[in-house]
Image (spheres, coloured by chain):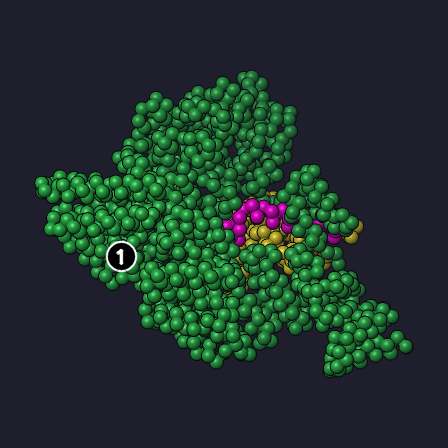
Chain colours: A yellow, B green
Amino acid sequence: MSSSPDVTELLLRYQEGDVGAADELVPLVHEELHRLARRALSRLPAGQTLQTTALLNEAWMRIDPGPSAEINGREHFLAVAAKAMRAVVVDRARSRGAEKRGGAFRRVDLDEVVDAFERGAADVVALDEALEELAAERPDLARVVELRFFAGMKHPEIARVEGIPLRRVERNWQAARAWLFARLSADDDQAS
Amino acid sequence: MTTGPSMRALELFEQLAELEGETRAAALDEACVGDDGLRAEVERMLAVESHADFLDAQSVGATRPERSFHAERAGTTIGPFTIVRTLGSGGMGVVYEAEQRVPERRVALKTLATGVVRPSAERRFHSEVQLLARLDHPAIARVLEAGTALTAEGTNVPYFAMEYVDDARDLVSWAEGRELRDRVELMEVVCRAIQHGHQQGVIHRDLKPANVLVDRNDAPKVIDFGVARAIDGTGESAPNATRTGEIVGTLRYMAPEQIDGSAQVDTRTDVYALGLLLYEAIAGEPPYDLEDLTLTEIARVIREMPPRPLGRSNEPVPEDLGWIAMRALEKEPARRYPSASELAADLRRFIDDVPVEAGRPSRTYALKKLVRRHRTVSLSIAAVVLAVLIGAAVSFAAMLRANDEAAKARAINEVLAGMLTGVRVEEGGADIRAVELLDRASEQVEGLGSRSSLRAPLHLTLARSYRSLSLHREAAREARRALALGAALSPADRVEAALELAESLADLDRWDEARALVDEWTVDPSFETAEPWVQLALRRVGHEITLEQGDAAKAAAGYAAILAESREKLGPMDPGTIKTEGQLANALIFANRQDEAAALMRERIEAGESASPMALLDARFLLTRAMAGQGRHEVARDLLEELVPEIRATFGEDHSRTRVAMGGLAAAYLRTGAAARAAPIMEEVALAWERREGPDHSETLTARGNHAQALAELGDVRAEDLLRDTYEAKQRVFGAHDLRTTTALFKWARMLRKEGRMTEAEPLLVDLVARSEASMSVQRPERHRYASELGLLYLQSGRPEEASDRFAAAWGGMARTAGARHADTLTIGMNFGSSLLESGLWDEAIDVYIELLADARDVFDEGDRRICILLNNLGGAYVQSGELHLAVARFADALEWANRHRPSDHPERLGALDTLGTRLVEAGRPGDALPHFEELVAESELNPAVDAKTRSAFRLGYARCLLATDRLDESAEEFATVVEMEHARLGGQSTAAFAALEEEFHGVLDLLDD
């Protein structure tokens, strides 16, 4: 756990309003999550779905700065981790696509995570791109998707992390889902 | 590349999502008239509703569990049960009505979320269920069986079969319209049932109206006893996920200790839940209003806020029944009923009309309150009563003089004192006749000469009476006289006389004298003999002085401590407690802890009628101050417009509260750009203060400063002298570093800056910033306002880099102090953006504007033009950094904004059309620009708001756009028109611009010839 003091310090800085700390935090958490995902999956029986929330909770336990840290710590972490999680999953999905095309298809443990995600959205890479487009216009909507879909957060948690009323999280989620649905089904139409 | 639905379609979808069925269809039709494309987009989005699993498959939906759990169809079997129908679904699983063949019975079958059960957890689950099976009470739905069954998909589903309650209604819907007595009796039975569970060692943990069913014979059945616990035991794989899901559904019924984990969940947790049930059964609504709150806010309300008082609606609730509910709902488990059976017993006492336990501890207090309330008399009656009493007492005293029976006199004085203070302003309102009577009484008391044993208490009484009419000078005089005859007073009365004097001196701005008194009397041996309210009040004066000296944080801490003591010793509704609350709120406002202040006052306002109307007015006023501190000036203004007339009617024209409230209203006008309305009010207020308290009183100076500021904003020539004079007076009275002094300096310097007198303003602002950095905490918003003001000066003096430095620091500081979404923070951020643009730092400006836009959309009204300014500036920055397509998108947003919020011929909208059109042409999309220009030309044609020069500029844009779309003929015609228009406008005079225009025109003609 050589990285944990850094993460702790970054979290504290981030809590104190140092936005730049988030940028440094993401790669660290990214790495942490990769490791955890590999480990967590090797322990699970085959075919068992990996809950991203559980994964994130576990990640948090490993870098929890202790009881003295403020509760925001976990929420800030989750917010940052959501980005990391999205990056992990999308990266993996993308490289898997490349491997498939190259004929070098080989299951690795992260694929199970990707599989779990692709049960909710046929193409994670396409979703990621569509999400980018949405974020350009309505970052608030894209954010809810990131937190809910990629970090597995529940609406009340999202409300707390984002500091917006629960009802608005619901509405944003509905709207984002509908927009993305229409956006991605348009892709399908064109492909067929 | 494909694109997603347009933002217009998205917004329409968001509006439609609020509506249902036919209303929605109608709204969709209406919004899409003549726009089939839009309709198609929205319909594509609505199609998501038939794809419930889209983006949703892998998450255990906390808020929409019906999607995540697979509901079995009728006829399916689960273990030995055949499903009849689905009754509902909740955080834990689905509940069915089901049939069992052997034994033949109907059951409520509850299945749990799949995938959580492992062998060890399953064992625990069964042992818990066995425990539950021991419960045997007519009002508890029995657990009949439990087990796990294999589903069609091959997963193990744990289930419970419970006694099925036929024709059941939940507690709250049953209670509606029932006799109060029936409702209370039913609750007694529920309490006994819970008690039975407790005796068997089972805590319900999840009591809520939906878990108390009432059958057709009006008999209650508690369901899901202990289920939460049994399930918790299985939640091994993802404990947080499971628990969060449950929290959502049940948070509103959780006890404070369940929320913060501050205490073990035990039987008293159920007592609390019983209190909630009782409350809802009586009131038909929960004790807290949790609508629209975030999870954190809900948790805070449950942990900290008192329940809404019962009996607010039309149905009166007997006071002692309210006490029972409040005792059960105590935040501290130790203060609740120790067991459900004791709660049941108290409900029984209520039904039998014998005194309840809950009321007893505070009964003497309640009696005192009763007596006090009965003295509430209306304005004119108060004056008459006062006249009779004083007349009688004084002549009576004169009679007594002959007999010199001091003991008797004291007894009479006590009665007199009680009666006189009964006519406090808080209860009756000020009346000038009362003042005259008091003055006459004062003379008569003086006339009693050397009878000090008689005079001293009368002076004290008079001091109190004057104070209740806000006549501080007179009050101080009488209190001094009483203290001078101190030996004739009891020790407790001496302390009270000191208190009256200290409070009067504080109100007179004579802080040093007040401080000396507080210091002397709080350590005097007689202090301990004084009544608790006197002790607390005297200590409160001490904190008032601390606040006055500028240490708001320390004062707030002091007030908070006194408030806690006061609530305990005097009760939450005591006028002293309420006053302390107000002062705490005030100190919090000064300490820039606006949210806390607002919450405190909201709580007081919500407690409503139980406080006096005056206390309520104070609370409402302080709330507007906190809102102003939060930057919500429009709301504060609207509230004040309502409030000021009420305050004036209640306290009278000449009362300090009226002046303070008027000052607040004027300040709100000033902050919302209505200086013309603010100025006359400010002038009136300043004169009133001066008349009342003299020219150097803090309130007089503050009001004068505000008046001067309003004049300055109106460009009135008197402003400058007034601003400088106010500043100099404040510097003299308060010193160089006092907030009031720096505020005055700030206003003066700003006026100079706004008039463009930069060389005069700069040294003042540099001095001001230096002072604030030397003596002001970074937590003070003023410090950042000053820095930003200096930044503005630099910006306007063509020194954008220096301005950027100031703005960047002020922006960050303000965000930390007031929050990133505070209106002031955004304003400073916008200034920062401007300074970056001026410095040519396009990319940095882009980053800043993007950040600001995100917040501005949430903070400002949708139609606030600052949003449009931000969009335009961001677009401009994109143009400069060469990202034309992004620029075009932002200008399109700006037009969209104008379409929504401005009439079609509004200059702001026309400007947006022009900008977007021009940039589209530059971006090589003249075809897209064309309709904008066509509209622009049409809308500006006969528009009086558009001057001739602008009109030709618009048409020139149109001409160029036509040229770019190769419509040469029309372009040439348009150019000809522009040349003609400009020729007419310039009166034949030739300018460089005109020459360039002609040249461009000839170029087009040449093209045409080719």
Residue B448 on image: x %, y % = 14, 49
Q: Is residue B753 left or right of residue B150?
A: left
Residue B451 on image: x %, y % = 11, 48
Residue B783 on the magenta span = no
Residue drawn at (58%, 40%) of the image: B64
Residue B128 on image: x %, y % = 44, 31
Quadrant hosting residue B518:
bottom left
Q: What kind of element bears circle 1?
A: helix
Parent chain of label 1: B
Q: Amino acid at mark 1?
A: Arg
Q: Is residue B258 left or right of residue B417?
A: right
Residue A160 on the magenta span = yes
Q: Is residue B384 left or right of residue B175?
A: left
Residue drawn at (67%, 71%) of the image: B879
Question: Foreground residue, B526 or B553?
Answer: B526
Can you identify the residue that label 1 sits on? Answer: B473
Asked if B988 appears above or below B920 in the picture, the reply is below
Asked if B154 appears above or below B987 in the picture, the reply is above
Asked if B842 appears above or below B401 in the picture, the reply is below
Residue drawn at (56%, 57%) of the image: B860
Q: Magenta-highlighted stretch: main secondary structure?
A: helix
Magenta segment range?
Answer: A159-187
Is residue B496 visible in this depiction of the protein? no
Q: Quadrant of the C terminus of chain B?
A: bottom right
Q: Is residue B197 left or right of residue B1008?
A: left
Residue B238 on image: x %, y % = 51, 44
Is residue B674 visible in this depiction of the protein? yes
